């Protein structure tokens, strides 16, 4: 019995309000993290979308950013079997650095994608690329849709609050 539900996790402060039982129930389905969700220690992450980490940072700090991201992943047991969905087009400075500097654990699985820069609506297949539109949340939801999930639940996407869960 394959689940048709995926949970897409942002990094909003509201994540702190979820109970252990709620985290346990969400772990019964597919979990998709993105951006700074790597700092969590609540739920196993099946897929983590990598895009735009360190945007605007000095290019000379890329290796430091890669090392910090990689260290966080390596020390977090919730990422022990994660597939990293990595942006793979000309603007993917961090994702390319992550791969080039070998920032992910040796056994990490990588799934590259490119950005569909034509549409503002979610693409229907991975071969059409993922639509970035208003932000990385769009990529993550489009990824879940392309993977065939018919129920996509957003968790920790706090449009009313700019705080992150680890602050």
Image (cartoon, helix red, strand yellow):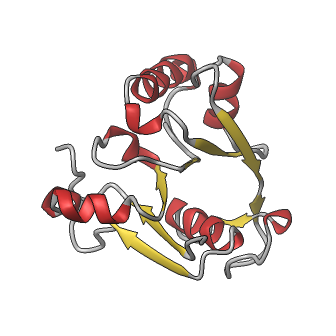
Could you tell me which residue is drawn at 41 percent across and 63 percent down? 28
Is residue 34 shown above or below 60? Answer: below
* Residue 121: image location, x then y, percent: 68, 82
Q: How many marks?
A: 0
Please indicate, yes or no, whether residue 156 appears anywhere in the rendered image. no
Could you tell me which residue is drawn at 61 percent across and 34 percent down? 94
* Residue 111: image location, x then y, percent: 72, 45
* Residue 5: image location, x then y, percent: 51, 74
Residue 119 appears in which quarter of the rendering?
bottom right
* Residue 112: image location, x then y, percent: 75, 46
Q: Residue lying furthest right in this view?
A: 127
Could you tell me which residue is drawn at 71 percent across and 64 percent down? 130
Q: Is residue 42 left or right of residue 83?
A: left
User: What is the quadrant of the C terminus in the image?
Assistant: top left
Q: Is residue 80 left or right of residue 161?
A: right
Please indicate, yes or no, whether residue 84 appears anywhere in the rendered image. yes
Could you tell me which residue is drawn at 28 percent across and 47 percent down? 42
């Amino acid at each position: 019995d394959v689940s048709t539900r995926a949970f897409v996790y942002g990094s909003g402060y509201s994540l702190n309000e979820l109970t252990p039982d709620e985290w346990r129930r969400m772990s019964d389905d597919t979990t998709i993290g993105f951006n700074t969700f790597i700092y969590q220690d609540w739920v196993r992450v099946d897929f983590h979308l990598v895009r735009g980490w360190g945007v605007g940072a000095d290019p000379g700090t890329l290796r430091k950013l890669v090392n910090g991201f990689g260290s966080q992943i390596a020390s977090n047991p919730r990422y022990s079997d994660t597939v990293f969905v990595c942006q793979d087009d000309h603007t993917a400075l961090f994702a390319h650095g992550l791969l080039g500097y070998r920032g992910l654990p040796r056994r990490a699985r990588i799934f590259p994608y490119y950005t569909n820069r034509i549409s503002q609506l979610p693409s229907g297949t991975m071969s059409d690329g993922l639509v970035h539109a208003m932000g990385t949340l769009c990529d993550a939801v489009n990824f879940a849709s392309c993977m065939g999930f018919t129920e996509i639940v957003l968790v920790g996407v706090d449009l009313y609050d700019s705080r992150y869960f680890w602050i």
